[in-house]
Image (cartoon, grey):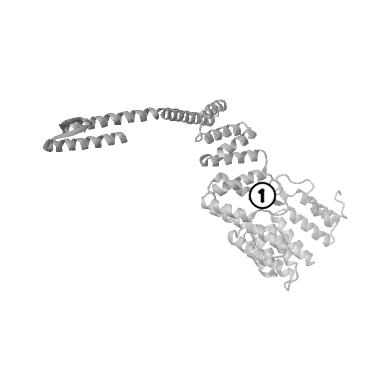
Amino acid sequence: MRFLLWLILFIALFVGAGLWLTQHDAYISLTWGDYIIQTKRSVFLTLCAVLFVLFWTCASSIHWFVGLPGRIKRYFKRKRELDSWKHLALGLSSLAGGNIPNATKHAKYAKRSANSDTQPHVALLQMQIAAKTNQFKELKNLSNAALINPQTEAHTLKLLFDAAEYERDTMKALTLLETAYTKYPDQAWVLLPLLTFYHQQKNWVKAKIVLHSLKKQKLISSALCDRYHAIYAIEEARFLIRQGNYKAALHLAKHAYKLAKDFIPTIETLALTMSKCGDNKDALHLIRKHWVKTPHPVLGELYRRIALLPSHLSLSMLAESLWKANPNHPESAAVYAQLMVENKQYAKAKEKLVEAIRISQKRKLFEGLAKVESQLGSSADTINALLRQALQAPGEPSWICHDCSHVMPEWNASCEHCHHFDTLAWDRVKIASLVGNPRIYEDFKAINLDQ
């Protein structure tokens, strides 16, 4: 290209000079030793032009022949690169179609013609084949070649993470996810497993950061995000309660309640924290407020425990106030009866329990009535009949993991058996125990249940 430009420039100059000489042509004399050459300017200029063209042509030809080996080398290098890309494409197509042998063959051909640009992609293809065939040791050996290229690094980290999960190497998997998160904080395959790991480790601080990234990428709904934040706050508040830092726990409990007001654990945690801070009146009021819509046994038990604390309010008045909040629900009768028993007003307790049993024959009601009858001095036959009815009644609901059906005594952020996050729900046990709950009979040890 440069040669053509120079040639065009020279021709233009030559034509311009020729036009000038048509008007100013004259003879010139050239001295070469003893020789004197006399010629016209036009002839001399034409001779110089011919000699220049010949010199330029020879120089360009020499330059082309000198660079020929390099051009041949670049041609074959480019051809090998194209062959490598072709076999890579065929290998990926075969892998997507499930043809592992054909994909392996193309990966082998691609590796033969690979260069520095295609080698990471070839290594990634071989890693994908190794992952499909569960050859995770080979997968790890190939990872170094694929990690050096930014285009293949993300896929390589994902394959290494899958391999670590397959081998149940939790720490290795977590390290890979944290490495990937620093470079690819918007990838779903990084964020979702990383959040799961932090949930299992109860690392709520880091879980909040990852949850924020998930919400930013619109990979999680706002409602679920608020629920998770509420659960984090509940767990942190419970930890502070165990440490005796009730004021900080109250702040977190209020934050959790603000995010999920109808979530039973948030109500329970806030009421418990209020009670720990000495504000029993507000704690009881909070439970009564939610008792209208959700007369939950957990809230009822907490209400009973707080009501038994020293207070200027009588147990009778506290029991009546909870009963009036939802008088037609059996849980109201159960809590009322428990408080009346504590207050030694057995007749009132029996009255409410009998009314509740007519509506709902729950195991808890028969247990409470049996306890009241024992305090009233009823016969062993009467008490035994009530206990048999309690055994025949449906089992009481519990906190059950929906993933593994594990039953837990109290709500927790994660199941203690499968460690899955937010899987506990208040539900009835599918297979009821044949002997019932042993604590039913703690107050009736002297009674012969076989009669």
Count of marks overlaid on the render: 1
Q: Which residue is mark 1?
A: 200
**Nearer to us in this view, 296 or 411:** 411
Residue 424 in picture, x, y percent from top left: 66, 50
131 left or right of 30 in image: right
Residue occupying the far bottom of the picture: 312
Residue 327 in picture, x, y percent from top left: 66, 62
**Nearer to us in this view, 185 or 380:** 185
Residue 330 visible in rendering: no
Q: Is residue 299 above or below residue 138?
A: below
Residue 353 visible in rendering: yes
Residue 63 in picture, x, y percent from top left: 36, 30
Q: Quadrant of the N terminus?
A: top left
**Nearer to us in this view, 88 or 51:** 51
Quadrant hosting residue 129: top right
Disc 1 residue type (three-letter): Gln
Residue 450 in picture, x, y percent from top left: 86, 48
Quadrant hosting residue 139: top right
209 left or right of 38 in image: right
Q: Residues within 10 Å of mark 1 (few under 14, many from 20)?
A: some
Q: Element at badge 1?
A: helix
Q: Is residue 161 above or below residue 408?
A: above
Residue occupying the far front of the picture: 34
**Nearer to us in this view, 191 or 232:** 191
Residue at horizontal 65 percent and vertical 34 percent from the top: 137
Quadrant hosting residue 254: bottom right
